[in-house]
Amino acid sequence: MYQKNLSTEAIDRTNHLSRIKNGVLLVCFFILILPLYQCTGQVTASETSYTYKNGDRNGIGKWYMGREIAHVMGFQGMGWLDRPEREAEENTSKLLRNMRISMGDMIADIGAGSGFHVFRMAPLVGDGRIYAVDIQDEMLAALRTRKQNGKFKNITLIKGNRKSANLPENSVDKVLMVDVYHEFAYPFEMITSIKKALRPDGELYLIEYRGEDPAVPIKRLHKMTEAQAVKEMQAAGMKLERNIDNLPWQHCMVFVKE
Ligand SMILES: C[S@@+](CC[C@H](N)C(=O)[O-])C[C@H]1O[C@@H](n2cnc3c(N)ncnc32)[C@H](O)[C@@H]1O
């Protein structure tokens, strides 16, 4: 009886010690290992989640990685997108040269708007294709009219949604996004969907008004800094290959899959 009691006591003591050991291991994980993991540059779930608070009047009150997302530019702004002085202000010809477009290229213009870039790129790809993606029916209607009037055969219109570009997987060599990323309501989901559509050597051209430059006459929320863009793209698995610094107002950032 005494023997039995003694061995029960020994088992209790062993269980108690093993509970203490597990507790110590758990504390070590939270105090030592987890911060180390975070220091490696890995992005944590809380950093990539969306938060909500009032901010700028041009913003939607939804924040991503420290940046407030801008309102989508309504179709009423079409006239501004097609303004005659735009070529001089943004040097679109140089942007298209930066893209090194070849005959046969499959290119997606995401947030194509009324097609300012679409109709300049279409003649450069020959039997390739331009996918013009937008979420607003009015923009797609304007694209359709222009496409029919110009008898363009190599342009496909796609209605995207706020989380997906609705492009086939592994279908494009290049993606162009001019003045749109900052207004994506779901930037992480959009880049994830775009990454799937890009071929392995595909390039994403992210064109945003330079947030670092107060001389660029655009509202703050409609500009972006390179540091912010890199942080957000990295969170979705894209890395900056180069930023071509030759446009008057915009960054021309080329991202590739990590
Ligand atoms: C400021 S306009 C720029 C249009 C065009 N890229 C240009 O530079 O002329 C932004 C366009 O992106 C579209 N857009 C916003 N969010 C989008 C999304 N998640 N997917 C596709 N298009 C989107 C808007 O409907 C709008 O037509």
Image (tube, rainbow, N blue to C red):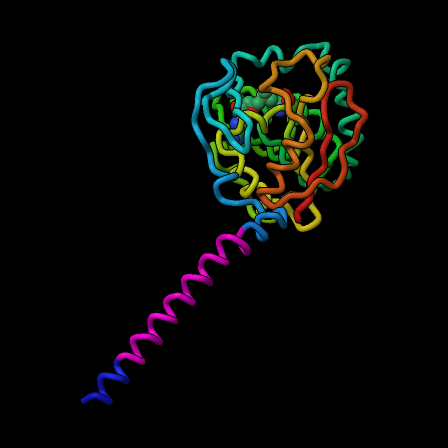
Where's residue 1, x and y in %? 18, 89
Q: In this rendering, is residue 76 above or below 65?
A: above
Q: Position of residue 201 (x, y in %)?
A: 71, 48
Quarter-of-image position of residue 178 = top right
Residue at the far front in the pictured view: 2
Q: Nearer the viewer, residue 68 or 155?
A: 68
Q: Which residues are magenta?
A: 9-34
Q: Of 223 and 33, which appears nearest the observer? A: 33
Spot occupied by residue 125 in the image (x, y as percentages of width and height): 73, 36
Ligand 1 picture quarter = top right
> Can the viewer see residue 22 in this picture?
yes
201 vs 30, left or right, is right
Q: Residue at x 58, y 34 (%)?
A: 156
In magenta stretch: residue 10: yes
Question: Image point 67% across, 32% down: which residue?
Answer: 227
The answer to whether 62 is drawn above or below residue 154 in the figure is above
Observer-nearest residue: 154 or 93? Answer: 93
Q: Is residue 140 visible?
A: no
Residue 257: x and y in percent read: 66, 47
